[in-house]
C-alpha cells in the first residue's frame, strides 16, 4: 500500500472520527455488534476484516500499529485509496463524516 507522510492527515481524521483516538474503542450499537463482530480499535476494524488485511507479525487488533495497517490496507482494497473513502469524500465536499 503506497502510504506516505502526506496521508497522515487522512489517517488521523479517520481515527478521530471512528474511535476518538481510543485504541480500545469498541462499537456496541451497529449491525456488526448485532452480528457478533463489533468494530474495534483505532480504525474500527471488525475481526474478519482485520484477519484478512493484517500483515504477518501484526496480529493484535488492539495494537494501534496493527489496527492502522489492517484498516489502511482495507481502505485501499475497498475504496482504491483515501480519495475513495466515504467519510473523507463527504468531508471534502463540505459534508459530515460518514463511517465506513
Image (tube, grey):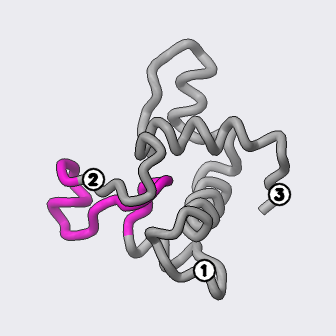
CA separation, marks 2 and 1?
A: 22 Å
Q: Residue furthest top?
A: 94
Q: Is residue 76 left or right of residue 1?
A: left
Q: Nearer the viewer, residue 41 or 81?
A: 41
Residue range (magenta):
28-46
User: Magenta span: helix, strand or loop, mainly?
Assistant: loop
- Residue beneath label 1, please? 58
Q: Residues within 10 Å of mark 3 (few under 14, many from 20)?
A: few
Q: Secondary structure at mark 1?
A: loop
Q: Are marks 2 and 1 in contact (CB under 8 Å)?
A: no
Q: On screen, 46 above or below 94?
A: below
Residue at image x 42%, y 50%? 22
Residue at image x 61%, y 65%? 65
Percent of width and height locating residue 7:
76, 43
Tell which tag, 3 or 2, sits nearer the viewer.
2
- Residue beneath label 3, please? 2
Q: Quadrant of the N terminus?
A: bottom right
Amino acid at each position: 500500500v503506497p502510504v506516505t507522510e502526506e496521508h497522515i492527515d487522512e489517517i488521523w481524521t479517520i481515527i478521530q472520527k471512528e474511535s476518538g483516538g481510543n485504541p480500545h474503542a469498541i462499537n456496541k450499537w451497529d449491525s456488526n455488534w448485532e452480528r457478533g463482530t463489533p468494530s474495534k480499535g483505532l480504525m474500527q476494524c471488525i475481526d474478519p476484516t482485520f484477519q484478512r488485511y493484517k500483515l504477518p507479525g501484526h496480529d493484535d487488533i488492539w495494537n494501534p500499529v496493527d489496527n492502522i495497517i489492517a484498516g489502511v490496507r482495507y481502505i485501499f482494497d475497498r475504496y482504491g485509496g483515501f480519495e475513495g473513502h466515504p467519510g473523507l469524500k463527504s468531508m471534502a465536499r463540505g459534508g459530515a463524516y460518514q463511517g465506513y
